[in-house]
């Protein structure tokens, strides 16, 4: 019987594949290295050009970013980096003030649309009569005169 040829083992196939890859990588290494270096320089230049915009955006979002940190990490931050807590009283006062101003504006517009103010009438130039000084005698009503003449009914006497 002839000798049978053994199948290559998995180890042998892996070793040959690794050797082939090693030679391929070694051959392409200078090109890949040059590509990586150029990409790094391009990225660094872009980051330098965009740095002011990035910094401004981070400053604007600082409060949100600090709030998202875990408590043990945010406790270690210096006080200057932590966001300032806004007073709830100030917020409520501003909302109340805005509501009051809106109400005043609404009432003024409503009153101006519904009625106009009464026109001004100057006072009369004729003086009012003086009631304390009378030139003619006061006239007595008949019923009072009857009481004075003893002709009143018996119930009143």
Image: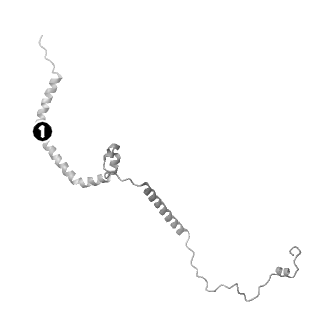
Q: Residue at x 12, y 34 (%)?
A: 24
Residue 58 falls left or right of residue 148: left
The residue lying toward the viewer, choosing from 83 and 101, is 83
Q: Residues within 10 Å of mark 1 (few under 14, many from 20)?
A: few
Residue 9 falls left or right of residue 57: left
For the C terminus, the image quarter is bottom right
Q: How many marks?
A: 1
Query: Residue 72's x, y, as percent?
Result: 33, 43
Query: Residue 32's x, y, as percent?
Result: 14, 41
Residue 60 falls left or right of residue 111: left
Q: Residue at x 28, y 55 (%)?
A: 56
Badge 1 is on which residue?
A: 29
Q: Secondary structure at mark 1?
A: helix
In this picture, is 9 found above or below 141?
above
The residue lying toward the viewer, choosing from 95 and 146, is 146
In this picture, is 84 found above or below 27?
below
In this picture, is 130 found above or below 99?
below
The residue lying toward the viewer, choosing from 87 and 62, is 87
Q: Residue at x 20, y 48 (%)?
A: 43
Asked where in the image residue 140 lies, by quadrant, the reply is bottom right
Query: Residue 61's x, y, as percent?
Result: 32, 51
């Amino acid at each position: 019987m002839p000798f049978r040829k053994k199948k290559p083992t998995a180890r042998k196939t892996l070793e040959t594949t690794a050797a082939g890859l090693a030679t391929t990588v070694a051959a392409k290494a200078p090109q890949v290295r040059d590509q990586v270096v150029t990409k790094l320089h391009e990225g660094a230049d872009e980051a330098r050009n965009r740095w002011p915009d990035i910094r401004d955006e981070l400053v604007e979002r600082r409060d949100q970013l600090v709030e998202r940190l875990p408590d043990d990490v945010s406790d270690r931050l210096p006080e200057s980096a932590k966001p300032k807590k806004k007073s709830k009283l100030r917020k409520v006062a501003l909302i109340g003030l805005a509501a009051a101003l809106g109400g005043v504006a609404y009432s003024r517009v409503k009153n101006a649309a519904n009625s106009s103010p009464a026109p001004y009438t100057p006072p009369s130039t004729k003086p009012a009569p003086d009631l304390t000084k009378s030139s003619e005698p006061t006239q007595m009503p008949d019923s009072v005169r009857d009481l004075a003449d003893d002709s009143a009914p018996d119930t009143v006497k």
